[in-house]
Image: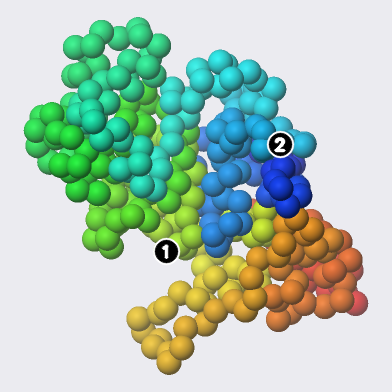
Amino acid sequence: MSDPILSIRDMRLEFDTFDGVYKAIDGVSLNVAPGEALGLVGETGCGKSVLTRAAFGLVPSPPARITSGEVLFGGRDLLSLREKQLRSIRGAQVAMIFQDPMTYLNPVFKVGTQLVDAIIAQQKGAIARRAARDLALEMLDKVHLPNPQRQFDSYPHELSGGMRQRVLIAMALAAKPKLLIADEPTTALDVTVQAQILDLIAELVSELGLSVIMISHDLGVVAQVCNRVAVMYAGQIVEDAPVADIFDNPKHPYTLGLLKAIPHPLRPVEHLAGIPGSLPNLYTPPTGCRFADRCSHAVPVCTDGKPPLMDLGAGHRVACTLYRKEHVDA
């Protein structure tokens, strides 16, 4: 197998706050292979977005503090690089799409001006403005934006939410990055436009051979785009498997709870299933499994220590005491 394009190894991240030290990420290890689309899922507050942003130096320090780990990209540990070195990677080799396109487009500049400026910045000024304009129009056409020339000369408020998201995708992919991070890219869009954006991302991934990290709390979204899923809970990876295995053969009780909470059109129920309780206090996190207080399968040994990610074969890993050999054999 080829080396991963991105390898996060044992990352730990804390935030210094007035209430104490908030332990947001605890020992996360994750690989993304070339051409792979990885879905990173979990409920709000589990650490999905902060993990990827911290990996590329997008979390302010202070108050954030990475206490251990490595982030290997292109053979270099990003955590050891200076800000100027990270800027040469962000945008050019790694691109991000965010969930609210209006927040990331300047309302006082036309869409085309922002696209051209971004392309010139990505290429460190090595491209003429006319050539950058031609590339911008080409990218707007590639993301299937209707009438690219007209939208090029429009202000962000004149475009719909779906059109603005297509502009951000065009901006992200103009530099032909190796890795695309899509952070809840369909949250602010209606269902029909969501489907169009997901189809577009899947099409571009296949066409350009990108690696992708799709961050979402919606398992249905990642099923449409991704071929592997990592499930996060309270700052830890609890399950990591091919997307088909996550849906057909989930192992961790938290993953099972997420799947049961999805309404099924062929199995109407009077009340939706839910996961009782709430996320643990990460100022003073539990010493054992962080899901134990909400888990119907919990046993006393679950509180003894953090369960490691165990390899079940076929690329399926799970962090759960139920699959410890000594517990299974007992």
Please identify the quadrant where the C terminus is shown.
bottom right
Q: Is residue 245 left or right of residue 72?
A: left
Question: What's under tag 2, amino acid-wise?
Answer: Arg
Which residue was labeled with disc 2?
A: 65
Q: Is residue 307 visible?
A: no
Q: Nearer the viewer, residue 112 or 259?
A: 112
Q: Is residue 320 left or right of residue 287?
A: left
Q: Nearer the viewer, residue 33 or 171?
A: 171
Hey, which residue is sitting farthest bottom in the picture?
270
- Tell me what residue is drawn at x 67 percent, y 53 percent: 235
Q: Position of residue 54 (x, y in %)?
A: 61, 37
Q: Nearer the viewer, residue 122 or 2?
A: 122
Identify the image quadrant of residue 14.
Answer: top right
Q: Nearer the viewer, residue 38 or 227?
A: 38
Q: On screen, 114 above or below 201? A: above
- Tell me what residue is drawn at x 51 percent, y 20 percent: 87
- How far is the residue under mark 2 from the one under mark 1? 33 Å
Q: Is residue 171 visible?
A: yes
User: Is tag 2's residue or tag 1's residue first in the polypeptide sequence?
Assistant: 2
- Neighbour tally class for label 2: few under 14, some 14-19, many 20 plus, Cα within 10 Å: some
- Tell me what residue is drawn at x 80 percent, y 63 percent: 286
Helix, strand or loop under label 1: helix
Q: Position of residue 30 (x, y in %)?
A: 64, 44
Q: Position of residue 149 (x, y in %)?
A: 10, 29
Q: Nearer the viewer, mark 2 or mark 1?
A: 2
Q: How is the image coloured?
A: rainbow
* Label drawn at residue 253: none
* Label drawn at residue 220: 1
Helix, strand or loop under label 2: strand
Question: What's under tag 1, amino acid-wise?
Answer: Gly
